[in-house]
Image (spheres, helix red, strand yellow):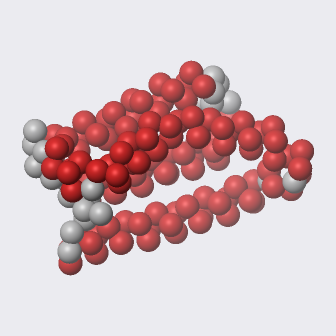
Amino acid sequence: MNPSLRKLLYILLWYIIYPNVLLLILTPGIYSNPENLVFLFVLLLSYLLGIIDTIIRPFSDSIEEDFSTNPIYSIILLIVFFFNPAFIALAFYESKNLIPTVLPFWNHIIISIIGAILLILGGIILVIGRYQLKKFGTGVL
């Protein structure tokens, strides 16, 4: 299969369809409650960074070649992607129910904005690093 087509299918499946379907099941109302705006912004930002990383990252000509390059990494990555929506749902419920009882100030909007800024800075480093690997070496880990 063409690597560009594989990237498109990868983005559609892992960043758009699969997580949204599972999040709608695991956290009903996550998209409709205005209180979740910062959480949704950070979620959208993290998926956007993943899409940018996928676009920059070189894919091999075949899936078998990707798995044969580093099979343990590929399996771990597949497991993490598979459980990613569940981790997001757990973080959502933790930030709503558990953390405010222990650290009341932690659920403040300023803390959320600081977290979003750190995520943006980490995403910039990720994209620059992936671009440098593509430009001067290989993006395959």
Residue 10 in sight: yes
**Where 18 sits versus 120, above or below?**
above
Q: Residue furthest bottom?
A: 136
- Quarter of the image for the N terminus: give it: top left
Is 84 placed above or below 120 here? above
Q: How many marks?
A: 0
Residue 49, image quadrant: bottom left
In the figure, is residue 56 to the left or right of 115? Answer: left
Picture residue at 50% right of the left edge, 37% below the top: 83
Q: Is residue 78 left or right of residue 86?
A: left
Name the residue: 49% across, 51% down.
Answer: 46
Q: Nearer the viewer, residue 79 or 11?
A: 79
Across and down, in percent, residue 119 comes to 55, 61
Residue at 16 percent across and 44 percent down: it is 64
Q: Is residue 35 visible?
A: no
Q: Split into 4 quadrants, where in the image is the C terminus? A: bottom left
Q: Is residue 89 left or right of residue 54?
A: right
Measured from the top left, where is residue 32 in percent x and y? 62, 27
- Residue 47 in the image, given as x and y percentages of width and height: 45, 47
In x, y percent, where is residue 96? Answer: 77, 39
Decide which of 61, 114 is in the foreground and name it. Answer: 61
Q: In the shown orientation, is residue 77 left or right of residue 27?
A: left
| Closer to us: 123 or 85 | 85
